[in-house]
Amino acid sequence: MRKVVFMCVLLAVTMFSGCSKSSPSVVDKFIGTWVWSQALNDATFKGDGTHLITIKKTSETSVSADYSYRFSGTYGGNAATQTSDGSFGVLNVESNTLVSTNVLYNIQTVLIYQKSGSPVTLKENYSYKFSTLKFEITSSNQLQITQTPDNGSPSIRVYTKQ
């Protein structure tokens, strides 16, 4: 009798523990910090820039996404650092993607560079408007962001999870 009871308990535990496992939601796949780095070597900026997207869960069907950029190098031949911060706002689940429409986001930028041994600070605010902002996870587990402006061609960037 003990053997039968033990087998029934074992069977029940096995069945119910299998049921408790669930696959991550669409939103959960996006949560975290994603990075895209670039080397700059143009007439004005030379150095390394890093773009960061931080995605946080707001519900089972939406996220908030923040943007930041960090640059270290030279500006016009002078040692410089630059920081930029902003928010994409809230994106909602559509199928296996995150989408926001009629997006207006602001980015605050601070550039500090040395000129004749003294720091010079430039502060600017930029506004960007897109008809669609779409986040997707690629087959190689990277974050692909497609930004479609109101009038123009979409731009695509791919980020790696940090």
Image (cartoon, rainbow, N blue to C red):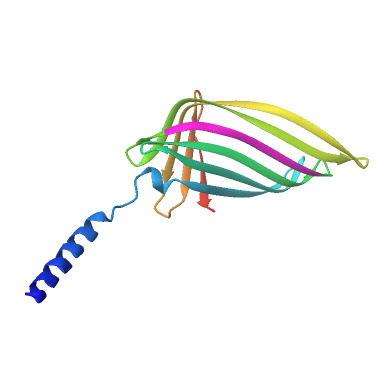
Name, please, the residue furthest toward the front.
2
The residue sitting at 75% across, 30% down in the picture is 123
The reply, left or right, for residue 74 in relation to residue 38 is right
In x, y percent, where is residue 111? 76, 37
The reply, left or right, for residue 31 in relation to residue 127 is left
The residue sitting at 79% across, 43% down in the picture is 80
Tag count in the figure?
0
Q: Quadrant of the N terminus?
A: bottom left
The reply, left or right, for residue 70 in relation to residue 31 is right
The residue sitting at 38% across, 40% down in the picture is 97
Residue span colored magenta: 80-91
Q: Does the magenta stretch include residue 160?
A: no
The reply, left or right, for residue 2 in relation to residue 127 is left
The residue sitting at 63% across, 36% down in the picture is 85
Name, please, the residue furthest toward the left.
1
Name, please, the residue furthest toward the right.
116
The answer to whether 37 is drawn above or below residue 148 in the figure is below
In x, y percent, where is residue 153? 50, 31
